[in-house]
Image (spheres, rainbow, N blue to C red):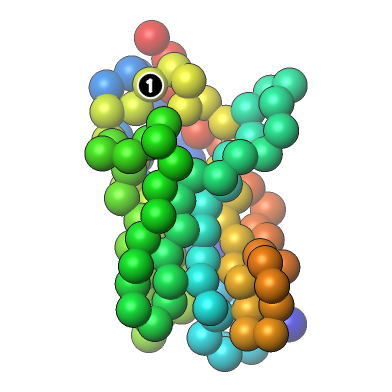
Amino acid sequence: QVQLVESGGGLVRAGSSLRLSCEGSGRTANPVAMGWFRQAPGKEREFVASIRWSGGTTYYSDSVKGRFTISRHRVKNSVYLQMDSLKFEDTAVYYCAAQRVGAQDYNVWGQGTQVTVSS
């Protein structure tokens, strides 16, 4: 069984930066892709960014494009989200997820880490 554990969330002022980390443990098979999602109070979970494990191709939602950067470290089984120029609207619980080989979509999820941006 693979577990994902996020870290790096916190309370920051608008315009500041945070770097989220997601570390995988357990079974070490490479995923097809990994991604970051977020859920704000009273809203549904939404896509933020993703990265294909093998080639490193990245995808971003329009709301974070140009401000957030997703990356991975294959040996460490880790994925990161560098968040710059944070806005109040970025406040949410952030989740990392993995699409394992043989799955059509993300099927392993972390517990989430809180990001709060004050203005």
Residue at image location 33% in from the left, 72% down from the top: 56
6 to the left or right of 71:
right
Q: Residue 68 or 104: which is nearer the viewer?
A: 104
Under mark 1, the amino acid is: Lys
Q: Is residue 106 above or below residue 40?
A: below
Q: Is residue 26 above or below residue 87?
A: below
Q: Residue 111 or 89: which is nearer the viewer?
A: 89
Residue at image location 69% in from the left, 72% down from the top: 104
Residue pointed to by mark 1: 87
Residue at image location 40% in from the left, 55% down from the top: 59
Q: Is residue 100 visible?
A: yes
Seen as rendered, the residue at the extreme top is: 119
Question: Residue 20: x percent and y percent?
Answer: 42, 50
Q: Quadrant of residue 53?
A: bottom left
Question: Residue 109: x percent and y percent?
Answer: 68, 61
70 to the left or right of 29:
left
Q: Residue 23 or 65: which is nearer the viewer?
A: 65
Q: Is residue 6 visible?
A: no
Question: Residue 108: x percent and y percent?
Answer: 69, 67
Question: Residue 78: x percent and y percent?
Answer: 44, 70
